[in-house]
Amino acid sequence: MISLVIPTYNEADVIQDTLKRAAEVLQGSGEPFELIVVDDASPDGTAGLAEALSAELPVRVLCRKGERGLATAVVRGWEIARGDVWGVMDADLQHPPEVVCELLKALRRENADLAVASRYCSGGGTVGWPWFRRLVSWAGMRVGTLALPWTLGVVTDSGSGIFLVRARALQGVELKPRGFKMLLEVLAKARYQKVVEVPYVFRNRTRGQSKLGARQYVEYLISLWGIGRSSGELNAWIGYGLAGLAGAMAYIAALVGLENRTDWPLAISLLLAIQLGVLASFIVDNGVSFRRGRAATRSLAASRLARYERLLLPGALMNAAVTYLGRTVGIELWGAALLGVMASACWNMAFAAPGIWAIWGKPLKGVGGRA
Ligand code: GDD
Ligand code: MN
């Protein structure tokens, strides 16, 4: 049986239609279901309107008083869920209820533990969003997966508000989400093996108003931070930063040293110094940042180093070019080298970081709650 939670705040205009449509499509799925509306004492009387349908449809209504928040409402709903599959869907029909059936089918077919509807895999999308919201949503997602590649890298839409999870994956797990992004908390804490994604198109809101605002964006960033702390991704990032620092220092010191003590051409010194810098940062990444992932990585250190060098090559060339240019326009060598390092750091952050994290893969234990 599927227990679908529908969190509501001031959705009087649409809640009855949503419940009717959801019930209709779920009946078609042939699987038993219950709809759990969790309302935060909406002043517009949403709870009463939902309750009115409970005689004819399998609808239960939970009314919270003195508490607000989408994600915590979902947790409350799941607490009283009776199904073996739990889900969540918005009340405003921006999530077409048919998608829930597709998620259910995919979950059963693939014997997955988690089924996520995605706007960002092929076939998915959004309609009617102003460019600004599209940009913010996309950027938020990119920042999330860049910052937490182990936890969020398993899906293309970690901000999705419509997904299903097996109840057993959350057995004994204490969920303490913040803000809007329930899925972040599930990805971080559920004990799951297999994830499936189903594309969907996020519809325009035709009735009622969105409750998403600046506060939710801040809560999103706080959630990322909290997850990173417990998953070890934050520590890995600190190591990654130290590796960059070690590389930069080795590079600048070697370059200045070679220039002062030898009469080799600058190009040769540059090549050597860059090589030393890359080696220094590899040693820190391999020995510190990604130490825990290393246990699960079967590759040889030499082949990891080769991949590392390949990924850092474009940034290194940029570094060399900037240093060289800086030198030709008369900047002190160490200053030019510092500029080169900063340019390549930006480049590597944007383009090389995901690949570098992937060299070691994620640690087997301790990332999120993955089984
Ligand atoms: N109980 C409760 N309490 N429900 C809430 C609250 C609250 O404080 N705030 C919002 N909701 C309900 C709304 O009534 C609606 O059913 C659902 O949560 C989504 O709220 P919207 O305000 O419509 O959010 P949105 O459309 O901007 O964002 C949604 O879609 C995004 C993209 O899929 C959310 O589902 C996001 O989590 C999602 O990322
Ligand atoms: Mn909405």
Image: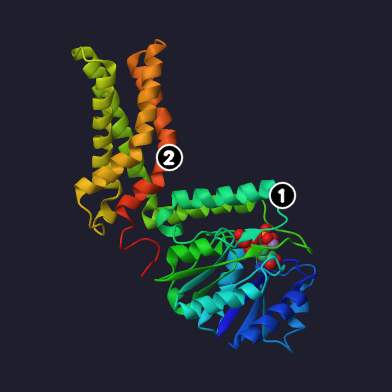
In the displayed structure, 252 sits above or below 5; it is above
Q: Quadrant of ligand 2?
A: bottom right
- In the picture provided, is 76 more to the left or to the right than 15? left
- Who's the residue at 20% across and 12% down the image? 263
SS assignment at label 2: helix
In the displayed structure, 334 sits above or below 131; it is above
SS assignment at label 1: loop
| Real-space CA distance between mark 1 and mark 2, rounded to the nearest whole angstrom | 29 Å
Please rate how many residues cluster around mark 2, counting C-alpha atoms within 10 Å: few if below 14, some from 14 to 19, many from 20: few
Q: Nearer the viewer, residue 353 or 316?
A: 316
Label 1, ligand 1: CB separation under 8 Å: no
- Dot label at residue 130: 1
Which quadrant does the C terminus fall into? Answer: bottom left
Give percent across and percent down for residue 105.
54, 79
- In the picture provided, is 365 more to the left or to the right than 221? left
Q: Nearer the viewer, residue 200 or 136?
A: 200
The amino acid sitting under disc 2 is Met
- Dot label at residue 45: none
Residue linked to disc 2:
349
Give percent across and percent down for residue 215.
63, 51
Q: Nearer the viewer, residue 72 or 331?
A: 331
Give percent across and percent down for residue 112.
45, 75
Give percent across and percent down for residue 208.
78, 63
- In the picture provided, is 140 more to the left or to the right than 271? right
The amino acid sitting under disc 1 is Pro
Mark nearer the N terminus (1 vs 2): 1
The answer to whether residue 194 is visible is yes
Residue 122 occupies quadrant: bottom right
- Who's the residue at 77% across and 76% down the image? 17
